Amino acid sequence: MKEKMIPFLQEAACVKPSRRQLDWLAMEGYAFIHFGMNTFTNREWGNGKENPQKFNPQKLDCDQWVAAVKAAGLKGLILTAKHHDGFCLWPSQYTDHSVKNSPFKGDIVKEASDACRRGGIKFGVYLSPWDRNSKYYGTPEYNDYFCNQLTELLTNYGEIFCVWFDNACGEGKNGKKQEYDFPRYIELIRRLQPNAVIFNDYGPDTRWCGNEAGSSRYAEWAVMPSELCKYAEVQTGAGPLAEGARLDFLYNAMQNLGTMPGILYSKGLTFVPSEIDVSIRKGWFWHPNEDPKSLEELFQIYLTSVGGNACLNLNIPPTTDGLIDERDVARLKDLGGLIRHEFSRKIPCTVTKLEGFPPTQPRYRVTLEKPCRSLKYVALRENIAEGQRVEEFRIFSDEETRFAMYDGTTVGNKRICALRDPFAHQNPLTSTFQPQVKSIDIQITAARGAADLSEISVYADAGAYHASSTTGAKKGLFRRLLGK
């Protein structure tokens, strides 16, 4: 096995993203807009038997959607063009279960895509493979039907940055069974919208994080076994333990995906980064009795998604009027304001890559222009265009190298490190930590290949943030983490 290990790790270190994946990662966050028949029936999942006459958003304003999305700092919007009930938000020629038979009569996909372009953000679509209305569902003809609808969306609404698929099918044990022809869907998207990333549990471009609660892994890898991401391009040979191994148990909800023990058993690796999809409310569709998540919770989700080598897909459901709820509008404004506030005090510094350290364990010294008592965050980026490599790292001050201000695992596209007093969980009598920090070191302690941090940024505490909404941050949440 020894003679196979090093060549395989060299391959694993060079599994690279495509141009479309790099563009997607650069967005960092975008909105999910769940809007449709469920909005008017007060459900999460419809049955496909709803009367289209119920759908009538009389104050529809997609420019208001875009303004709310932009206020949070999000760079795009994905619209649920068709959910599981089969009701289409555009006048599809392939079904009567659409807006064309509603009092609204318009084309919400067009309204939303046009608003995104006016507002300078990207537009994407969700098209549910599960369709509880279509007479073709459960037959081979359904894949033709689905591709026809997909073609309508890909050819009539301009540039699409993302096509979002799930694998939902809740028909039950004795219900209709549909074999989704994802390879055919993917080929169609590549031909008609070659720059669009495709989200699916199994790739090819982005994948589910494994939950809808906004929780990220302790170590988020974009380099995945092909046994999980079966629709993605395989970029390596087999791992040293792959012969006779089984990885058919892999699923997105597992916490150790992509870690070293797992990839050694893979027959080949792919590059498929994770998306954190979560709703601003409890439900995905709007319900009048629900409130948005607290500012505290949303900010923590931001730190661990965008700041945890993933992209954030934040669902914002419009009301029956066709508007974003004012409670959500206020919370989104505060979220964007808080993010800008927390990262407003970037500290001028000089970064030096120290000599004498091996390529897989480089050490960087960050010398601050002036000593600082209120360090709060360090943001790191790998040169991910050449592959994701960092397994572990630590951050410590020039005065104390034994006890770290931060111990981390992966870096990837971006890692936001919230610093702490290294003696916070030690006997205070043993502390040698000096809050007046002059420099910090970032030590890569383990990597799959030559590690290269392309960006290191340091931020000081910006002080208290005053939220405009009535249920903002908890008192003392956004305080200085180091010093007094």
Image: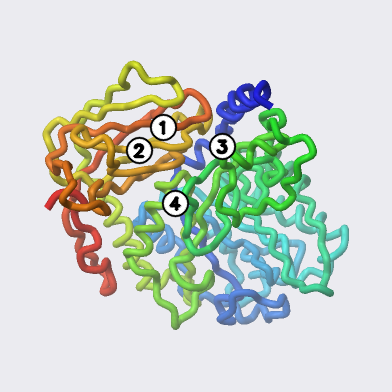
Please state which amino acid type lies under the numbered disc 3: Arg
SS under mark 2: strand
Say whether disc 4 or disc 1 marks the residue closer to the N-terminus: 4
Q: Position of residue 259 (x, y in %)?
A: 56, 42
Query: Looking at the picture, does residue 394 appear above or below residue 47?
Result: above
Q: CA distance from mark 1 to mark 3?
A: 31 Å
Q: CA distance from mark 3 to mark 2?
A: 31 Å
Please state which amino acid type lies under the numbered disc 1: Thr
- Who is closer to the viewer here, 475 or 446? 446
User: Residue at label 2?
Assistant: 394
Please state which amino acid type lies under the numbered disc 4: Ser
Say whether disc 3 or disc 2 marks the residue closer to the N-terminus: 3
Q: Position of residue 374 (x, y in %)?
A: 16, 46
Please state which amino acid type lies under the numbered disc 2: Arg
Say whether disc 4 or disc 3 marks the residue closer to the N-terminus: 3
Query: Looking at the picture, does residue 67 appear above or below residue 37?
Result: above
Q: CA distance from mark 1 to mark 2?
A: 7 Å
> Residue 20 has which mark?
3
> Residue 305 has which mark?
4
Q: Is residue 27 left or right of residue 96?
A: left
Q: Which residue appears at 27% of the width and 26% of the height? A: 351
User: Residue at label 1?
Assistant: 445
Query: Looking at the picture, does residue 388 appear above or below residue 87?
Result: above
Q: Are marks 3 and 2 in contact (CB under 8 Å)?
A: no
SS under mark 4: helix
Q: Residue furthest top?
A: 356
